């Protein structure tokens, strides 16, 4: 069965002659070393490569490896690309087999699936919602959840840091920030497990998540609380959004960046466990965890590829004929190491434009080797890592709007591990790690570590509220953007420096630095302004771990 009409109501045009063959974007070589795999594809096939994502066939796209071509798609100055998956012709004609990626590409009314003025409006609501977070209290809240997970790790033998810590922590953080109840959190955890299995229950599981999002919206409309869901409702009140839009935007806040944050935690931990100098300098306080995370971002980008790009008309890209409804897969990790990728051509269309800010947690992409004690990255290899770190956040209108929050989650996760598990080291050789297919993010099947001891966590009690209670009668004032007119200009080095610990955004002096571990800043300590108290990670995490 096929869809006779394109999303704009016109018939699909006749299919252009496709490539003679498709290159596999799967297999052991791809899983073991995706960066080398991308380089080999680029050298053999050029900047745009026809690929098959699944060995069963039918899941096809154009892998964009050249930097000029990547920026052309991401900035979309031609207007020919769309983020609306209804334009994916192969999917409309039911040629694509079930795959774990597909639920991520479902159409919806949120910032990731929209373009133009609608995207600007929806992204603005997300950015304004994230702007309400109080960085010190949010950091304390992340620490609070991280310590719960560390306490639950097995006491003896190797500990799988991926499945037991890096995978669930970002999900638990976002559930908590959104003000999700424990029953809802358990339902969503089970649904996510089913979605990731890409089995016959995955579609029903995705609908279960939608149902929970709508129940949350109804709950927060009746009784607003100090959480991001209530703030999203408040920030969009003047636009009179319906339930579907609010639910889809809330789902976006929950899901976006989960895999990326988990993969970034893993790559930062691996950097420390396999680089003696990095571990030594971090332990001595000469290098911060944020700086190590910045280096890991450039050496092994957590997000490998983005799939949200479909052609609304025929075009040429990198010498290839792209047909209406074709999908472009932009490989953010495949920074071009050749001369074409740097210098003048590297700038590309719009490359000098900073991504839109996203509130007090917004931090510019970390710069390789940034920090007063870190040496500058040497030569071409260092420059390659710098550019990978920049591209890790995307580019153009859809660049990541929550970079600072992502860095805060990774910084907190790794810092708590180092503090709580002294002497942590890999339980296997690095080359023995098995990696999952890195279509979107690169993570191992497991990351076993051993530690000589485990330090107990201080009991700080309940963390301070991470946001205020939203106003009930009018929307909040817009957040001040770091690149707003009149703001001090940001130079190339500053624009890509990691946020210092305790500072997650442009107005560094605006927020008090966090106190000692387990002691949240003074703000909000004396009041319970609606944040769900006593929210515990462990019931949800155990449900998540066993898949329901």
Image: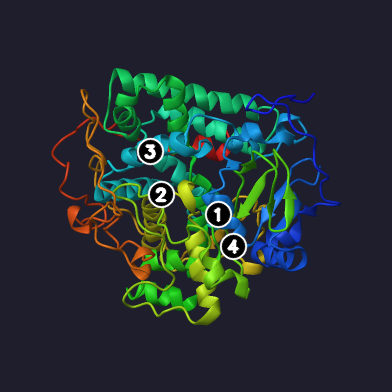
Lower position in the chain sequence, tag 3 or tag 1: 3
**Mark 4 vs mark 1, CA separation in Å:** 16 Å
Q: CA distance from mark 2 to mark 3?
A: 33 Å
Q: Residue 267: where, in percent of width, then height?
A: 52, 61
Disc 2 to disc 4, C-alpha distance? 44 Å
Residues at marks 2 and 1 touching, judged by CB atoms closer than 8 Å: no
Q: Are the residues tagged 2 and 3 within 8 Å (C-beta)?
A: no
Distance in Å between CA atoms under marks 3 and 1: 21 Å
Dividing the picture into quadrants, the one containing residue 69 is bottom right
Chain-order first, disc 3 or disc 4: 4
The answer to whether residue 96 is visible is yes
Give the labeled residue for mark 1: 303
**How many angstroms separate mark 3 from mark 4 (CA)?**
28 Å
Location of the C terminus (image quadrant): top right
Q: Position of residue 342 (x, y in %)?
A: 55, 72
Sequence-first disc among 2 and 4:
4
Q: Label 2 to label 1, Cα distance in Å?
A: 29 Å
What secondary structure is marked by label 2?
A: helix
In this view, 193 is above or below 408: above
Return the disc, 2 or 1, that comes first in the chain's sequence: 2
Report the residue marked by disc 2. 151
Q: Which residue is mark 4?
A: 67
Identify which residue is drawn at 54% across, 53% down: 162
- Residue 118, quarter of the rendered image: top left
Residue on which disc 3 sits: 126
- 270 or 112: nearer the eye? 112
Residue 269 appears in the picture as rendered: no
Going from N to C along the chain, the mark reached first, 2 or 3, is 3
């Amino acid at each position: 069965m096929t869809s006779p009409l394109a999303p704009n109501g016109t018939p699909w045009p006749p299919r252009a002659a496709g490539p003679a063959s498709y290159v596999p974007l799967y297999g052991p070589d791809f899983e073991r070393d995706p960066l080398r795999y991308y380089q080999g594809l680029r050298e053999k096939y050029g900047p745009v490569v026809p690929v098959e994502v699944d060995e069963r066939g039918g899941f096809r796209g154009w892998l964009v490896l050249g930097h000029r071509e990547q920026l052309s798609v991401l900035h979309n100055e031609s207007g020919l690309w769309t983020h609306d998956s209804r334009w994916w012709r192969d999917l409309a004609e039911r040629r694509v087999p079930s795959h774990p990626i597909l639920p991520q590409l479902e159409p919806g009314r949120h910032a990731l699936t929209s373009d133009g003025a609608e995207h600007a409006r929806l992204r603005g609501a997300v950015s304004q919602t994230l702007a309400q977070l109080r960085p010190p209290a949010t950091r304390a809240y992340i620490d609070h959840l991280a310590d719960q997970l560390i306490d639950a790790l097995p006491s003896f033998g190797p500990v799988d840091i991926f499945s037991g810590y890096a995978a669930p922590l970002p999900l638990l953080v976002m559930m908590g920030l959104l003000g999700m109840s424990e029953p809802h959190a358990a339902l969503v955890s089970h649904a996510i497990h089913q979605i990731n299995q890409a089995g016959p229950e995955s579609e029903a599981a995705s609908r279960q998540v939608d149902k929970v999002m709508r129940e949350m919206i109804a709950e927060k409309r009746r009784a607003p609380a100090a959480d991001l869901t209530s703030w999203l409702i408040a920030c969009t009140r003047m636009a009179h959004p319906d339930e579907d839009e609010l639910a889809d935007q809330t789902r976006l806040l929950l899901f976006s960046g989960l895999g990326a944050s988990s993969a970034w935690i893993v790559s930062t931990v691996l950097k420390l466990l396999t680089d003696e100098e990095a571990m030594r300098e971090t332990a001595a306080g000469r290098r911060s965890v944020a700086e190590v995370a910045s280096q890991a971002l450039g050496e092994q980008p957590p997000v490998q590829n983005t799939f949200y790009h479909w052609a609304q008309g025929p075009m040429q890209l990198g010498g290839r004929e792209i047909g209406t409804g074709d999908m472009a897969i932009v490989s953010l990790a495949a920074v071009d190491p050749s001369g074409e990728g740097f210098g003048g051509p590297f700038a590309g269309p719009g490359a000098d434009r900073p991504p839109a800010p996203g509130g007090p947690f917004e931090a510019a992409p970390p710069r390789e080797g940034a920090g007063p004690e870190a040496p500058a990255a040497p030569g071409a290899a260092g420059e390659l890592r710098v550019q990978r770190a920049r591209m890790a956040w995307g580019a153009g209108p859809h660049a990541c709007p929550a970079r600072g929050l992502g860095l805060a989650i990774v910084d907190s996760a790794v810092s708590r591990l180092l503090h709580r598990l002294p002497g942590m080291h890999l339980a296997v050789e690095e080359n023995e790690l098995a990696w999952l297919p890195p279509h979107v993010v690169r993570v191992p099947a497991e990351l076993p570590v051993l530690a000589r001891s485990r330090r107990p966590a201080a009991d700080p009690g309940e963390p301070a509220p991470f946001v205020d209670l939203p106003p009930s009668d009018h929307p909040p004032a817009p957040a001040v953007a770091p690149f707003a007119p009149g703001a001090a200009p940001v130079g190339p080095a500053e624009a890509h420096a990691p946020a210092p610990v305790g500072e997650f955004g442009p107005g560094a002096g605006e927020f008090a630095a966090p106190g000692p571990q387990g002691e949240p800043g003074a703000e909000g300590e004396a009041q319970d302004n609606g944040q769900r108290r006593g929210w515990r990670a462990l019931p949800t995490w155990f449900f998540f771990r066993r898949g329901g």
